[in-house]
Amino acid sequence: MSEQCGRGFDGALLSGWLDGALTQADEQRVRIHLEDCDTCRSQVEQMRRFREVIMSTEFAVPPDDQWSERPRGAASRLSLGAGWIIVAVWALALGGYAAWEVWTSDEPLMGKLIVFGGWTGFGLLFLGVLLDRLQAMKTDRYREVEK
Ligand SMILES: [Zn+2]
């Protein structure tokens, strides 16, 4: 693209310009060039838009109304909450039982530790999701109060 517009600086300066991370001299150079170069202006514009998309996906997740599983009414929220609790209890019971089975088995200690390590990882992942979900439900409730 630099061949087309004959700008005398590196393309990286364009993104630096977007960031506001340039030295004053560079900033001026880019600004002056952008004033009379459509090619670079549209390139900067594209970069800006691309960044906006990235930013908005990164920081606005999840937009609540896009959650397909978001409960609509109090009843469904209650059953969803109960469902999660049951799943949690079930997972804990099953995990506890299986843990006991493995721990009391003849498996060598190393094997036990490997199995427990994996379970702990899964357990923490699961717990994270669960807490997220409960948090989301709580915020929902607050939101309803505000209305
Ligand atoms: Zn240019």
Image (tube, helix red, strand yellow):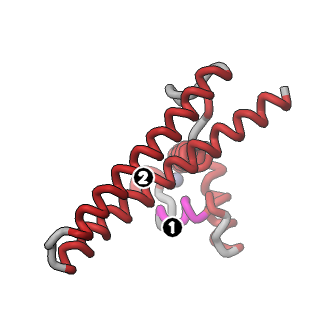
Some atom of ligand 1 lies within 8 Å of the CB belonging to the residue at label 2: no
* Quarter residue 75 falls in: top right
Quadrant in the picture for the C terminus: top right
Give the answer, above or below, for where 127 lies relative to 114.
Answer: above
Q: Amino acid at mark 1?
A: Phe
- Chief secondary structure of the magenta span? helix
Q: Which mark is on residue 24?
A: none
Outermost bottom residue: 109
Task: Give 94 or 17, whichever is nearer the viewer.
Answer: 94
Q: Is residue 111 left or right of residue 62?
A: left
Residue found at x 18% / y 74%: 111
31 in magenta? no
Residue 4 seen in the current view: yes
Gap in Å between the C-alphas at discs 2 and 1?
Answer: 61 Å
At 24% from the left and 61% from the top, the residue drawn is: 101
Would residue 110 be found to the left or right of residue 134 on screen? left
Tell me, yes or no, whether the highlighted magenta stretch contains residue 12. Answer: yes
* Displayed quadrant of residue 105: bottom left
Task: Residue type at mark 2: give it.
Answer: Leu
**Which residue lies under the disc numbered 1?**
9
| Number of marks drawn | 2
Figure quadrant of residue 30:
bottom right
Give, as a single range, the part of the protein colored magenta: 11-16
Is 106 displayed left or right of 55 in the figure?
A: left
| Residues marked 2 and 1 touching at CB (< 8 Å) | no
**Mark 2: secondary structure:** helix
Query: Can you give x and y, in whole percent of width and height, for residue 102 in the image?
Result: 23, 65
Specify the label residue 92 is tagged with.
2
